[in-house]
Image (spheres, rainbow, N blue to C red):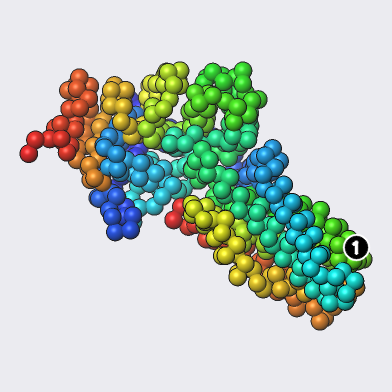
Amino acid sequence: MLDTEALAQPKQEVGTARAWTRFPRQVLVVAFKDLRAELRTKEAINASFGFALVILLLFSFAFDPFEETTRAISGGLLWIVFAFAGTLVLNRSFARELPNDCLDALIAAPISGAALFLGKALANYVLVLAVELVALPVFGIFYNVRWASQFPELFLVMLLGTWALTIIGTIFSALTVNIKLREVMLPMLTYPILVPALMACMRLTTALVTGVPIDADNMAWLKVLTGFDIVFTAVSLVLVETVLVG
Amino acid sequence: MSAVAVEGIWKFYGDYPALRDVRIEAPPGACLALIGRNGAGKTTLLRIVAGFSRAQRGKIRIWGKEPREAETRRQIGFIGHGISVYDELSALENLTLFGRLYGLADPRRSALEWLERTGLERVRNGLVREFSRGMRQRLAVARAFLHEPSVLLLDEPFTALDDRAIAVLQRLLREALAAGKTIVMSTHQLREALELSTHVALLTRGQLAFHGPRTPEMVEDPGYVYARYGEDRPN
């Protein structure tokens, strides 16, 4: 005679004492898995970093670094490079799960779509931010801007802007994972949505690298950026289960 | 209570009904062989039962609960067409990862135990991308069994397995059945499947053509179910 009551109970020890830390632990497990896999292959990070350097170099040929107009658009140039280079990392995020049908195993695991999504977003955030931090001094040299003069404020803008890029890129990476032309579709879908965040980043960065502090005039852009991050993080967390399972 | 209950499932791809009002039950401790020709809807049905895909109509119940509930997913072990392990990670890292995701008390110890049970303990630190096909398949089996699921969903589990992996899987399936676990497996390898199974379900073009206990005739002649209930039956 089978003890169906016992069979119907999970065998894992998931003590209630640890229940409140379960979600952050699951997020970190997914994030570390992605980071470890990427650091072993270096597929996305090498491509992204190489692309950022090449674009910065090409733009430096097109714009005279000693002209005032170049400094006036330097924030825009920098964030175009970050957005393009970031897309190369974000494209790999869910595509990495396709060989061997690994996405099935993740969806089958008893973790919420939100934990899976945040774990992937966190790994992407670290990778994109790493590319940006290496590209930033190169940008300073090529465009003759004082990026270090207000670095804490600039770093804050980079943290917020990169999160916007990451959160939108990750959710659309999940959405386009089964599309054959996902490398083309991802930027086509993400850039229009990212316009408010990119505009805020460009305005704030241009101000900061030309010596203008964050004051009442450009504080509105910082609020736009923060609001964008909060709203789209919340929307993505709500929608991700539907995106993954339908 | 059924371990697995499929209650009037309909699934459409565009206008095409891939599954039409499918109703199947697998009692606790049963081994249900889900058979049918290519395109009959076996994989679609298993993916819905596993919670990877949603049906447009009908319900799935695993031990009376929705398959997408976290508690239900802890009960399910799935082997699909892919091996569902990461090439860039070692065998031990893969199993430890899934052990953590399933909330095992000691993921590393469980991982080591299953590496030993599947004969992979000597290559535990080797990257999966360096493994032979057979080793990768045994690792996939270890991944599916790692969290001791009470319901095993296997999509053509014997296809493309080498001899050793078939032997490992058959041994583990017999042990699982002896422990009262429930197995639902889709397969084209009728002989292997019917020897293990207690129940049979035949899908024909998305519809259930037969569902019932396995009979001695089915084991003697694996083509019997198709001839008696399937498209091959005389009009």
B166 above or below A164? Answer: above
Residue B110, horizontal then vertical, whole percent: 58, 27
Question: Can residue A9 be seen by looking at this rendering?
Answer: no
Amino acid at circle 1: Ala
**Drawn side of residue A126 relative to residue B96, left or right:** right
Q: Residue at x 81, y 53 (%)?
A: A134
Q: For the residue labelled by badge 1, is the local secondary structure a helix, a strand or a loop?
A: loop
Please tell me which residue lies in front, A110 or B202: B202
**Which of the 4 image quarters holds residue B175?**
top left
Please tell me which residue lies in front, B3 or A113: A113
**Which of the 4 image quarters holds residue B231?**
top left
B21 above or below B76? Answer: below
Query: Most extreme residue toward the left, as rendered?
Result: B235
- Pick the quarter of the image with the C terminus of chain B: top left
Q: Which residue is mark 1?
A: A148
Q: Residue at x 57, y 49 (%)?
A: A94
Please tell me which residue lies in front, B121 or B106: B121
Q: Residue at x 53, y 40 (%)?
A: A99
Q: Chain of mark 1?
A: A
- Pick the quarter of the image with the N terminus of chain B: top left
Query: Most extreme residue toward the bottom, as rendered?
Result: A217
Q: Residue at x 61, y 18 (%)?
A: B122
Question: Can residue B128 be seen by looking at this rendering?
Answer: yes
